[in-house]
Image (cartoon, rainbow, N blue to C red):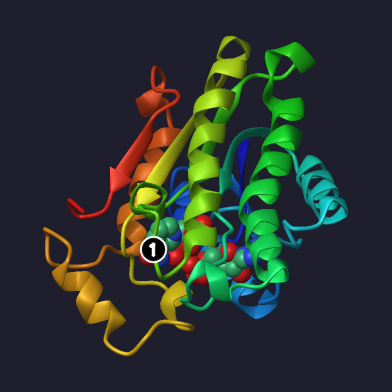
Amino acid sequence: MNKILITGASRGIGAATALLAARHGLTVIVNYHRNQAAADKVVQTIMDSGGKALAVQADVSAEADILRLFEACDRLPGTLSALVNNAGILETQMRLDQMDTARIQRILTANVTGSLLCAREAIKRMSTRYGGEGGAIVNVSSVAARTGAPGEYIDYAASKGAIDAFTIGLSKEVAAEGIRVNGVRPGFIHTDIHADGGEPGRVERLRTSIPMQRGGTAEEIADIIWWLCSAQSTYVTGAIVDAAGGR
Ligand code: NAD
């Protein structure tokens, strides 16, 4: 049985992707940072439907945690065929000249370094260069990589812009080794990432700025992530799919 490792999968887009991948028969490694109860609930839901899953705590900002996460994955039967770099953080809205260095480093380390290191570990397991069977890596970016999020989250936008460059570069680096690397750029999606830090009325303001006049759901993004992981997209690599309701 093939395995899929999804970072930040205890809730939101990661959890929706975990449930979908399990329905397609993959063993799911549900990485979580702090909320073990939520991760256990995702695992239980999968197991109740006859699927296989394991919750593994790891902070993607810490290399030692990432190595431990992949070792836990190695101990499960099956072949790692997909990695979803989904974990990400967004902090309170502010201008760049109000941000302290620690915040900028936190965002870049979690969103960028964490994704690069997870991809590195996945490649060592998937690449035909290392005797692997190939696989798929999906990086979760953001519409902020295109808009730049001025006055709100320039640090976050910069991290997602870096993710897009990484998706394009890595897709070419490992294309001949059986690994596809793609990205998804969600727009405004109704998840708990927006629970902190937004100004009053922000959600309504964002909604009206979207041509489709609504936010997306975690499940709508999970569908794209899964498609990019699946055998339905075997000739797609280096693509970054905009899923932002036309924004
Ligand atoms: P979310 O906050 O529910 O999910 C993010 C997950 O990442 C959480 O489970 C969180 O615990 C985990 N995480 C954060 N830091 C971590 C760390 N250091 N180590 C391990 N896990 C960590 O929000 P979401 O909307 O589901 O976000 C998923 C991804 O989608 C993120 O990369 C986010 O930037 C991206 N995204 C979301 C939106 C949106 O509007 N919701 C839009 C564009 C992009």
Above or below 180: residue 151:
below
How crowded is the residue under tag 1: few (<14 C-alpha within 10 Å), some, or many (20+)? some
Label tally? 1
Amino acid at circle 1: Pro
Most foreground residue, 44 or 18: 18
Residue 202, given in percent of the width and then of the height, sits at 29, 80
Q: Is residue 233 left or right of residue 139?
A: left
Name the residue at 76% across, 36% down. Answer: 121
Q: Mark 1 highlights which residue?
A: 150
Which residue is the extreme one toward the right?
64
- Which corner quadrant of the image does residue 132 belong to? top right
Residue 40, given in percent of the width and then of the height, sits at 64, 72
Residue 197 visible in the displayed image:
yes
Residue 54 visible in the displayed image:
no
Check the picture and name the quadrant holding the C terminus.
bottom left
Residue 9, given in percent of the width and then of the height, sits at 57, 61
Name the residue at 48% across, 38% down. Answer: 164
Name the residue at 49% across, 27% down. Answer: 168
Above or below 37: residue 60:
above
Q: Is residue 241 left or right of residue 27?
A: left
Q: Secondary structure at mark 1?
A: loop
